[in-house]
Amino acid sequence: MTQAEMQASATQSSYSVPSTRKWRDYFSFNSDHKVIGIQYLVTSFFFYLIGGVFATAMRTELATPESDFVNPEMYNNLLTLHGTIMIFLWIIPAGSGLANYLIPLMIGARDMAFPKLNALAFWMIPPAGLVLAGSLLIDAPQAGWTSYPPLSLVSGKVGEGIWIFSLLVLGTSSILGAINFLVTILKMRVPSMGLNDMPLFCWSMLSASGLILIGTPVLAGALILLAFDLLAGTAFFNPTGGGDPIVYQHMFWFYSHPAVYIMILPLFGALSEILPVHARKPIFGYRAIAYSSVAISFIGLIVWAHHMFTSGTPAWLRMFFMIFTMIIAVPTGIKIFGWLATVWGGKIALNSAMLFGLGMISVFVIGGISGVMVAAVPFDIHVHDTYFIVAHLHYVLFGGSVFGIYGALYHWFPKMTGRMMNERLGILHFVLTYMGMNLTFMPMHELGLIGMNRRIAVYNPEFQPLNILCTIGAFTLAISTIPFLINAGWSWIAGKPAGDNPWRGLTFEWQTSSPPPIENFDLLPVLNYGPYDYGSGIRFPGEEIEDEETNMEAPPGGFMPPSESRAGS
Amino acid sequence: MQGSTIDPAKTDLNYHHDGEAAAHHEEHPDHRLFGILVFLAAESMIFAGLFVAYLTFRVVQPVWPPEGSPELELLLPGINTLILISSSFVIHRGDTAVKQNNVAGLRLWFGLSALMGIIFLAGQVYEYSNLEFGLKSNLFASTFYVLTGFHGLHVLCGVGLIGAVLLRSFKKGHYSSQHHFGVEAAELYWHFVDVIWIILFFLLYLLH
Amino acid sequence: MKIPSNILTLLAGIALTLISLWYGKNHGLLPPAASNEADLVDGLFDAMMTVSMGIFLLVQGVLVFSVIRFRRRQGDNTDGPPIHGNIPLEIVWTAIPAVIVLVIGVYSFDIYKQMGGFDPQAANDPGVTQIAMLPGEELATPLIDASKAKPAHNHVHLAVGIGAFPEDEGKMADVNVDVMGLQYAWIFTYPDSGITSGELHVPVNQEVQLNIKAQDVLHAFWLPDLRLKQDAIPGRDVELRFAPRKVGEYPVVCAELCGPYHGAMNTKMFVESEEDFSNWIQEQIAAIDDSTQTVAVNSADRTDGDFLKPFVEEMGISDVDRTVLQQLHSHPAVSSDRTAQVVNALSPAA
């Protein structure tokens, strides 16, 4: 089929297919990437609220040193489910949701490479998530989200079994999603778009997908062995049978450290989209930011044992992993300085999306700095498994990922729904989140340094004042979601119509209507300028672009090798 | 977990049939083979993880294999290995046949490959039933059963895929020299299973 | 009067440096150090805090300044300048962090070495040994006769953890203590005198070596005031070697999740003058002799209940522990038989 024929059939299709989605589509096995993207985002936000309830319950318990709000076993259930849900059912799927919605739009494709597979990957999440969250009613896992044996082998077979099952399903879903992202980004760009013309979000998803494909299967391997130990009575990780619990830790962290980058990279990408648009200035150092994503994912694969500095790791291993962990600060620093240089001298519109974007830099940098500190072995020996680590990881995952997700939602909400969000509620949401975040997690640094270990339901009464601060912060965070929920719900139904390109963005997703038609573009767009060419005299690209669209996209037989363009089976 | 190992391949196969029939949007170039390759790369990481775990157990254990592990019989697994390796060549002839529009040849060679896969599985079941140790005997026994069993499941999937290709080959005009993605996917998967077995055989039987 | 912007930048840079240097010395975030190792770690922490404060101020300063100075004015729909990058600048901000982390890395390496991290007896993974049954577990795996396991260990004691100071390598520590972690207590055995205690007593200014083991699940032995921590791993030998410098009472905390009552698994370390320490040893020996029960040096055939009874009265059970123990009472469904045993043994004190 030639390009011209493709275009012809594309034009035809706009007659035969209704161009809007019915609400029912969002509850069905639909293979449209935009439907799936929204399904991901809404589902993961639902689980975020559940995980948030668990977190609030934990902080309520920790308002007093005694165990009075929940019993210690319930506390361990809560901390396990909080960690697992926030990682596997909120941040990772939310990143997948953004990627699903945005990648085809950004690269000018009509859908993902494997739409049915995409839908399948999504529909694995709700059942696994509901089973995991529902386990609280029967017998929840209580060995922490790390689920270290031997504790995980002796703390309740049912809960632990549910945990393993859910993670295997969620991991599979994540792998299938990553295959789709990788193939779509590498193979489905409009012919005029080279790798270095892609929006940075695509670069970061490429890096994150690579990590998912390399890391997640190893976690699956660890979980299979753990399941055998738990259910069949083998002794891979069970010291009573001669097994070695440290091997589990290595396998677990081989995935779970890269998982940190799987969680943050998509939002780094989203931030690289948000900042240039709202600062009206090109991204500073496109290639540096793009390649630093790839560098982070490569180095990220060889730093996992820094989670095990006080475990059974010999000295040389501690030093090796210390050095590589610290080196990760370099590409991360390149990104942060690149973002700062992007906003420097721009024309910053301080709307909700930009506030969350700048807020993300502001809090993430604290997590990044404390990350270098805990990479230093002698210091990590002191703070490992203390509240200092809790503070660090929340600055990275809440300050980095969650701020990024909120920023992305505010930024692309007009595209997804065709309606603007309310700015006042958005700013209120930001102020509450920013204050709550720092109030909750900043004191935890000090708690860890003075001797409070993590994952405890009862603690030394002298730590109480700081813990009360944290609890107040946690309540603030819980309250902060209310303006967002009201804003999102109300704006979706009755927000001000957004128009196709309310932010005057230059990437492809802004060149189509809001919300985009079912196959994204009536005519496939052509790349006439880079994704961030602000200030180069391009005025209202939304109007100008129409003239420039053309059917003559690629020289025949050009981009795709003939073997790849073969169709059918 | 096993579900995951077969789903993408299956979905891919199914998906494009529906897609073609509906033909409601333009054909984009076929990326399914690339998708399968990416998937197999991810799959191989599960095995890589399990292999490295096994090697680590070997290193950190004071005595390896743990006391009480009997010597493994090499004859039957050796024959099994030969069968599996040669089936890779057999299945490739099926692929060559379909590229020459020879569907009968495809059926012959794929049928033979499936048969060899089934013989391999039967051999493995026979070996299991004659071993002196069980799953829980010691660490070596556990790794042995889990690794070979997990691989065996993959062989079973491979036989299933070959069977699916065989069934479809009886639909007239389904496969031709131009359209034979299913054939290539099944062949690729089979080679993957084969390579994994060679590593596994070396680690479990020869390094034992 | 208009001050040139490069002078302002210079002033800001000087202020930033001064604040960082001051903060690095005066953050007051760490508890007092009780050993020389702790001083080393604190020095590293201070250095990192200085650099961190500088980066923190720089980033937040640029953000706040940009938001104020480069804010879009009402009605201005123009774009900013089309600057796509600046290679020399990018090289600078790649090189500076690279140098910083390199310096911190080398510094950390040196500190770790001075703490004894590279003592060959404590720097290598000794491998695993099989341990007795896990709590609450049916006989899932056949047990190997303990006498057959690990003959290699008898010659040189190998362990993972923090070993002797470089100048003391190869020398025996002045005091050896065997530490056993179990749900939810630490048991300290002094092999020289056969004393078993629930609290750790050590003499000041002497080298102490803790040989740490875990009986059931992972635990982590943490001395916050000495900045030392090491996981206790069932089936592996780990050690911590240190020289406390100040007489006093320091918390001992379990830092690895070990079950519902993990938070209550803590005790005290008493650093005493040499005289007090030997008195304590004498008292303990006398107490053992007085009790009807004789202490067997080989403790393997005793239950934890027996194990704990002799010293349970003098365990420093704080208010927190008390609460938890009461909860343990009201909570018959504790996760393991072992816990129940410990509870029974501890209950007279509660």
Image (cartoon, grey):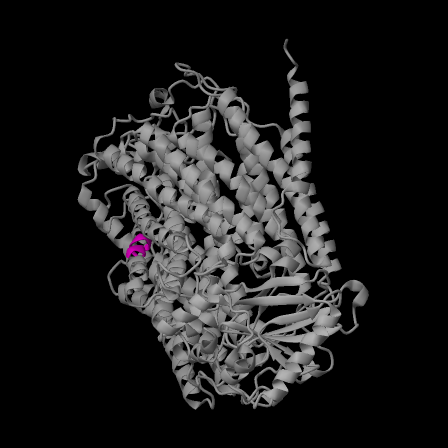
Question: Which picture quadrant has residue C5?
Answer: top right
* In the displayed structure image, the side of residue A16 where residue B99 appears, left or right: right
Q: Is A131 on the left or on the right of C101, as rendered? A: left
> Residue C225: image x %, image y %?
63, 58
Residue C194 or residue A38, whichever sits in front: C194
* Residue A131 shows up from this direction: yes
Q: Is residue A122 magenta?
A: yes
| Residue A371, x across and y down, in percent | 57, 48
Q: Determine whether A137 is above or below C151 in the image.
A: above
Q: Is residue A369 magenta?
A: no
Specify the principal SS of the magenta part: helix
Q: Residue at x 28, y 25 (%)?
A: A499
- The residue lying toward the viewer, choosing from C332 and B176, is C332
Residue numbers of the magenta segment: A121-126
Percent of width and height locating residue C107: 72, 50
Tell me if C151 is positioned left or right of C333 in this view: right
* Left or right, residue A424 beside residue C28: left
Q: Residue at x 57, y 53 (%)?
A: A450
